[in-house]
Image (cartoon, helix red, strand yellow):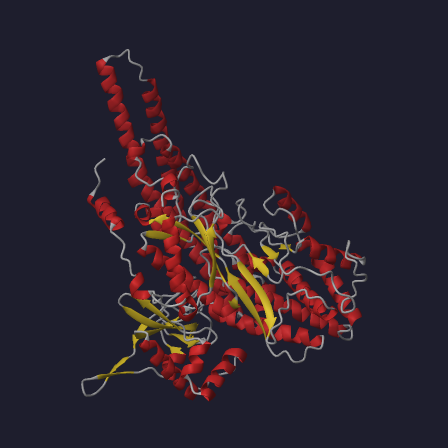
């Protein structure tokens, strides 16, 4: 088969030696790790060194309490930030924000300002730091503004530190910001997150004050975001149009060896991958991202990194930055990163585990069980709030992680199902069951479970019977939301968790007030009754099993398997009322997010369908035709020499290939018809997504089935796409 000019160009680009920029940007040569960590971050230490003391204290107050920073102080901060950034080579600054695309966005502006004398000066004011005006017309708004209303605003988020992003050709000061319309409505994922942090702080402070903790003034959620991903050689990546366009393989038969030997998880990291990881860590450490863990994941060529905990806004910004740096470093190593939730069929997909906890400004973790009655009391009230929240708002948690990619992963025997439940561990579950039933917990030796009087059985910080199948699992002093997809922003899951827990904390406070106050008897009663009402959501067994699906249905738990179904929660009146009550999202803002999510879902399926049609018609069918021609020529040649020589095997292969090609063409035609029908129907966003789910995806699956069948019979030399055995095992 002769390669076309286009194919030769692709191969040439894909095979170019990668540009190694490590020495240009790492900045670690000759430096200790401790001295270099956070070098490119306008951190608290840098602020303390570069700002006058009154300005520094005012800025810290804004960061820690959310108080407004006046423009005069902002000017001082801007000057110090510019001087520091220019010292690291920065020539431009950008307001770095997170639109509803799920990615990050930035517009670079130069510090340079021409003077009237023909020269120039460097300028960066408090106004430029605090607010920008990017064109908002091309970002999804879900109906929040008309297309012609282009103006949008970015607003500095001082809770997340600015940083300098370096490249071989220069550096840019990146300022984390929120993004809103000219009417003040949120156009991003960060603004609802910041609002939710305020909501849970107010609710948690109120809860703590019911038990006499009057010195607490602020409560903040924290997160640690584990990131799973795949690596593939960049040459293979460029030869797979489906990977380039969609992030996943639309075709691919199973190789002889998959992950059945369980030999990749925690296995030895190959030299090439380890070199990549080391460079990745160096760059992220310089950017203040506290990466702590790296290892091989379950599937071949799948890996995971995990940072230390941070405040929720900082943590999510760092994860978005991590995804960007992952791609940059991989490219320099001749690799490509796949962060799709299911890049390879029949292999484990990738998640992004959000470890969530909550602590007060005195340094206490509200999810630390503790050893004293008072600590037990705080823990049990917090835990009860979370159990109630997850049960009451299963639909919102499922909606927060809904995406086309995650639909492939959830419930696929390597990830939590679409059913939302809580794992607490055997010891804590027994405590709760005993409390509900009014008995002593088994083997506790602690006596009565009247809260605030007797201590709970001592719980280890990290409960050993971890359940990796649970979507929302307690792991000692935090919860791990494991159903988040690897390619998703954690902003929505975190904002939704914050909001629903705030609502449950308010519920408990209201219940105590209605009963006359927060004495031990009333607290015990409210906790016991609330847990009894919502214990159906607690499940400590195998969430992957068919038995759990049946059991969950008996319990009345939701099982919304697809994104269009899950997103219906965003239009539910109870959910609209919840978000408006806590000032996290208005009804209009919530509706816009449903519209944007449905639009993105439908667009992704459309791209996948178009790629499926194109690859089948221009790559796979021609390969099948070439093989048929080869077989036909062989059969004719053999028979011309001696008709008595058996050609049954070749004839059978010819028939098999021909029937496969016929089935593939029919499936492609059916897919084209289905796509045209859906695209021409003029649906709204939700209806369009539903039609893509029901009409287009089934036809795509039929095309894949036919194509994967051909891959098993067509001559390997003729097959146009790198196969799974190459994509996953050559690195």
Nearest the camera: 665 or 232? 232
> Viewer-proximal residue, 523 or 216?
216
* Rendered image quadrant of residue 81: bottom left
How many marks the image carries: the answer is: 0
Residue 620 position in % (x across, y down): 32, 37
Is residue 100 among the parts visible in the rendering?
A: yes
| Residue projecting furthest to the top | 644
Q: Which of 454 and 530 is in front in this view?
A: 454
Where residue 466 appears, as percent x and y from the top left, is: 61, 52
Decide: is 648 above or below 126.
above
In the visual, does 185 lie left or right of 21? right
The one of 316 and 615 positioned closer to us in this rendering: 316
Residue drawn at x 54%, y 44% is 413
Residue at the image point whose x is 53% and y is 68% from the top: 587
Query: Could you say which quadrant of the image residue 117 lies in?
Result: bottom left
Query: Could you tell me if residue 101 is visible in this image?
Result: no
Q: On the rendered image, what quadrant is the N terminus found in?
A: top left
Give percent across and percent down for residue 465.
Answer: 64, 51
Image point (26%, 12%), residue name: 643
Q: Give the vertical position of 480 relative to 657 (above or below).
A: below
Q: In this view, does 383 lie above or below 657?
A: below
Residue farthest to the left, as pictured: 118
Place of residue 629 in the rendered image (x, y in percent of width and height, measured from the top left): 26, 28
């Amino acid at each position: 088969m002769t390669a076309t000019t286009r194919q030769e160009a692709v191969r040439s680009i894909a095979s170019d030696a990668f540009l190694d920029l490590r020495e240009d940007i790492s900045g670690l040569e000759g430096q200790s790790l401790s001295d270099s960590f956070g070098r490119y971050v306008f951190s608290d230490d840098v602020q303390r060194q570069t700002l006058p003391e009154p300005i520094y204290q005012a800025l810290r107050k804004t960061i820690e309490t959310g108080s407004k920073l006046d423009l005069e102080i902002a000017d001082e901060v801007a000057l110090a930030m510019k001087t520091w950034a220019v010292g690291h080579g920065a020539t431009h600054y950008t307001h770095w924000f997170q639109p509803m695309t799920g990615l990050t966005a930035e517009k670079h502006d130069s510090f340079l300002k021409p003077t009237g004398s023909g020269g120039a000066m460097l300028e960066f004011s408090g106004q430029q730091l605090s607010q920008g005006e990017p064109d908002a017309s091309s970002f999804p708004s879900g109906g929040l503004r008309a297309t012609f209303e282009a103006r949008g605003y970015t607003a500095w988020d001082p809770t997340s530190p600015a940083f300098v992003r370096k490249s071989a050709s220069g550096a840019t000061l990146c300022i984390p910001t929120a993004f809103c319309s000219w009417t003040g409505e949120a156009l991003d994922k960060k603004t609802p997150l910041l609002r939710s942090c305020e909501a849970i702080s107010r609710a948690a402070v109120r809860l703590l004050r019911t038990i006499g903790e009057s010195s607490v003034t602020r409560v903040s959620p924290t997160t640690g975001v584990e990131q799973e991903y795949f690596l593939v050689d960049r040459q293979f990546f460029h030869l797979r149009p489906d990977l380039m366009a969609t992030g996943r393989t639309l075709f691919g038969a199973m190789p002889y060896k998959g992950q059945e030997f369980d030999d990749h998880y925690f296995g030895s990291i190959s030299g090439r991958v380890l070199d990549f990881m080391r460079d990745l860590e160096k760059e992220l450490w310089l950017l203040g991202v506290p990466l702590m863990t790296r290892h091989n994941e379950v599937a071949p060529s799948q890996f995971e990194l995990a940072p230390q905990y941070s405040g929720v806004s900082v943590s999510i910004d760092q994860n978005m930055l991590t995804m960007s740096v992952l791609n940059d470093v991989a490219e320099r190593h001749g690799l490509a990163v796949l962060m799709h939730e299911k890049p390879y069929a029949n292999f484990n997909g990738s998640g992004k585990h959000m470890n969530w906890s909550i602590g007060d400004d005195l340094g206490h973790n509200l999810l630390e069980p503790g050893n004293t009655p008072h600590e037990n009391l705080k823990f049990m009230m917090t835990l009860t709030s979370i159990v109630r929240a997850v049960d009451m708002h299963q639909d919102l948690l499922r909606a927060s992680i809904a995406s086309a990619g995650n639909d492939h992963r959830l419930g696929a025997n390597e990830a939590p199902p679409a059913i939302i439940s809580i794992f607490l561990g055997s010891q804590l579950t027994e405590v709760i069951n005993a409390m509900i039933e009014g008995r002593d917990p088994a083997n506790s030796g602690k006596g009565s479970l009247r809260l605030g009087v007797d201590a709970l059985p001592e719980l280890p910080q990290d409960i050993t019977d971890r359940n990796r199948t649970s979507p929302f699992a307690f792991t000692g002093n935090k919860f791990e939301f494991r159903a988040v997809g690897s390619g998703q922003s954690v902003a929505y899951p975190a904002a939704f968790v914050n909001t629903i827990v705030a609502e449950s904390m308010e519920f408990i406070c209201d219940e105590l007030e209605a009963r006359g106050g927060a004495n031990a008897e009333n607290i015990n009663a409210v906790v016991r009754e609330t847990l009894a009402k919502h214990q159906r959501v607690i499940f400590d067994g195998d969430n992957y099993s068919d038995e759990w699906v049946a059991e969950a249905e008996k319990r009345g738990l939701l099982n919304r398997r697809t994104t269009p179904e899950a997103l219906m929660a965003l239009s539910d009146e109870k959910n609209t009322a919840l978000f408006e009550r806590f000032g996290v999202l208005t009804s209009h803002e919530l509706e816009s997010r449903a519209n944007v999510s449905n639009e993105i879902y439908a667009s992704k399926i459309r791209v996948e369908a178009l790629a499926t049609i194109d690859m089948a018609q221009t790559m796979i069918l021609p390969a099948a035709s070439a093989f048929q021609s080869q077989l036909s020529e062989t059969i004719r040649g053999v028979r011309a020499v001696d008709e008595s020589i058996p050609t049954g095997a070749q004839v059978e292969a010819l028939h098999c290939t021909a029937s496969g090609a016929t089935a593939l063409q029919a499936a492609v035609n059916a897919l084209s018809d289905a796509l045209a029908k859906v695209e021409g129907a003029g649906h709204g966003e939700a209806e369009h997504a539903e039609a893509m789910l029901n009409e287009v995806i089934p036809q795509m699956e039929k095309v894949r089935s036919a194509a994967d069948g051909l891959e098993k019979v067509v001559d390997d030399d003729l097959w146009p796409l790198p196969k799974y055995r190459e994509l996953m095992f050559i690195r």
